[in-house]
Each structure stands twice: as C-alpha cells, then as structure tokens.
Image: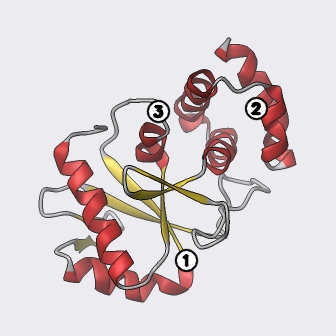
Amino acid sequence: MVGGAALWEAATACHEALARAGLPLAVLGGVAVCLHGYRRTTVAIDLLVQPADMTAIRAALEAAGFRWDDEAREFRSSTGVAVQLVAAGAKAGRGSEVLLPSPAAEQVTVVIEGLPVLSLAALIEAKIACGEGDPRRTHRDFADVVELIAIHGLDGSFARHLHPRVRPAFRRLVKHAT
C-alpha cells in the first residue's frame, strides 16, 4: 500500500492511539487519495484533527511511541514516518474560503481498510482548494483529483457535493479525466 509497510503500520498505530483516547481524526492527503483508489507514492501521513485536542493528541501519540520533531513540526514513528497534524477549521488552501471540516462531523469520514478517511467529496474539495492556493502544489493536487474522478466515474454533477467556490475547478478537471 502507499509508501510501504512502515507507512501503513504508522497510520494504523496513529488511529489506534487516538481511538483509545477517544479523539476523532480523519486521514487526508496522499494516504487518503490512495485509500480512495488512486495508488500513488506518498511518504507522510496527514491527520485531520480538532485543534482543541492537540494536547491530548500529543500525549496519545507519544505514549504510542511517536516522537515530536520540533524543527519539522511533525511527529515521527519509530521507523521515521512523518505524521503531520492538520487542524479542522483551517483554510483548505491559502486564501481559500473552503475550511477543513471537523473529523467528528457526520458524513465527513468513511472507514476504508479500518481507517477513518475523509469522504471522497471532502477530499476532492480540500485538494482543489489547496491546489488553487499554492502554485507549487497545483499539479499534484489537481492530478490527484483527476485520477479520483476517473477511478470513480464522476461527472460534473458531483460538484453539488462540493463547496461552491471549488465547483468551477472541479468541472474543468472532469474534462481532463475523460
């Protein structure tokens, strides 16, 4: 899967540690893209979490053997896998109107291979918003969306599930996926 066994083991360990502590999370980013069917390489785990839970998350992950890397501002597993925390309520992209949802909100997550993952609509929405806000990420985020559109057979009507701000970009990307 994704970036190898170490990445999968780290993702599972994060989920188990936070679940034991009763802390909601959703996998997003490259791992979520892979879990939704587009197999590509990724080397980090991105977790959508509640900002108010940060202290408890840090305690839960450290108790599970993850260490905080202050310079990189991320956790590291014992095998070196990076775990980055992304705050719910933050802008999904620079200057974006789209805000990242709460991982505890209804219909935001789906369980795939035992992990809570951003729903397809929430993931596509975040990827487009992030890509629009950062020219260095545009090609990667938009490519992920194009592949997800193709894999899931989405058409322009799926835009109704997305924030109005990203709907035009989604419809343009649908044309690239066919």
Instruction: Report the Cα–Cα distance between label 1 and label 3.
Output: 26 Å
Is residue 99 shown left or right of residue 160?
Answer: left
Q: Residues within 10 Å of mark 2 (few under 14, many from 20)?
A: many
**Disc nearer the start of the sequence (2/3):** 3
Checking the image for residue 170, the label placed there is: 2
Instruction: Report the Cα–Cα distance between label 2 and label 3.
Output: 18 Å
Q: Which residue is mark 3?
A: 37
Task: Classify the position of the N terminus by image quarter.
Answer: top left
Q: Element under label 1?
A: loop
Q: Position of residue 9 (x, y in %)?
A: 21, 55
Q: Which residue is mark 1?
A: 50
Quarter of the image holding residue 72? bottom left
Disc 2 vs disc 3: Cβ atoms closer than 8 Å?
Answer: no
Q: Residue at (37%, 49%) from the top-left corner?
A: 113
Q: Residue at (69%, 46%) from the top-left corner?
A: 125
Q: Position of residue 66 (x, y in %)?
A: 21, 71
